[in-house]
């Protein structure tokens, strides 16, 4: 294993051998972490660039259809919930009324 001048300086800064070894280990660990972070950042940047490139390649009509399909799903869910609420309201079905109806039928 080759030791760089920077690593030699780190080893010489400690008061005893144990501390010197710890300093070198911490330095090497920090270098490894920095390399890993750089690699992940580069991969993320490449993937993001790829996604933006694909979006640019799509024509406006395709993007419009994708957005409308997403919005359509949300609108449909809202309409269903509203219809369900309106049906329950028109039938006057609420827990308190149901309980009172059951009590009346028992009597």
Image (spheres, grey):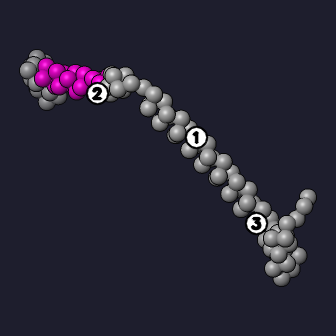
Judged left or right of residue 27, residue 58 is left
Mark 3 Cα shell of 10 Å, populated few (<14), some (14-19), many (≥20)? some
Disc 2 target residue: 71
User: Mainly helix, strand or loop, the magenta region?
Assistant: helix
- Give the quarter of the image for residue 69: top left
Label ID, residue 80: none
- Label 3: state its secondary structure: helix
Q: Nearer the viewer, residue 29 or 2?
A: 2
Q: Could you tell me which residue is drawn at 45 percent across and 28 percent down?
A: 57
Q: Is residue 77 visible?
A: no
Q: Position of residue 79 (x, y in %)?
A: 20, 23
Q: Nearer the viewer, residue 98 or 92?
A: 92
Q: Could you tell me which residue is drawn at 71 percent across and 62 percent down?
A: 30
Label ID, residue 27: 3
Q: Which residue lies most toward the bottom here?
A: 15
Q: CA distance from mark 2 to mark 3?
A: 52 Å
Q: Is residue 41 above or below residue 77?
A: below
Magenta segment boundaries in residue numbering:
68-87
Q: Position of residue 46 (x, y in %)?
A: 58, 40
- Whichever of callouts 2 and 1 sits on the residue coming sooner in the sequence is 1
Badges 2 and 1: C-beta atoms under 8 Å apart?
Answer: no
State which quarter of the image contains the C terminus: top left
Disc 1 target residue: 46
Q: Could you tell me which residue is drawn at 52 percent across and 39 percent down?
A: 49
Q: Nearer the viewer, residue 87 or 33?
A: 33
Q: Which residue lies most toward the right here?
A: 1
């Amino acid at each position: 294993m080759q030791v760089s001048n920077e690593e030699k300086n780190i080893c010489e800064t400690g008061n005893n051998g144990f501390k010197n070894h710890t300093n070198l280990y911490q330095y090497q660990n920090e270098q490894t972490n920095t390399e890993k972070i750089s690699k992940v950042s580069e991969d993320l940047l490449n993937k993001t660039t790829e996604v933006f490139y694909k979006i640019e390649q799509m024509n406006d009509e395709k993007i419009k259809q994708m957005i409308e399909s997403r919005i359509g799903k949300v609108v449909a869910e809202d309409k269903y919930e509203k219809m369900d609420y309106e049906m329950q309201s028109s039938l006057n079905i609420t827990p308190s009324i149901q309980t009172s109806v059951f009590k009346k039928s028992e009597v």
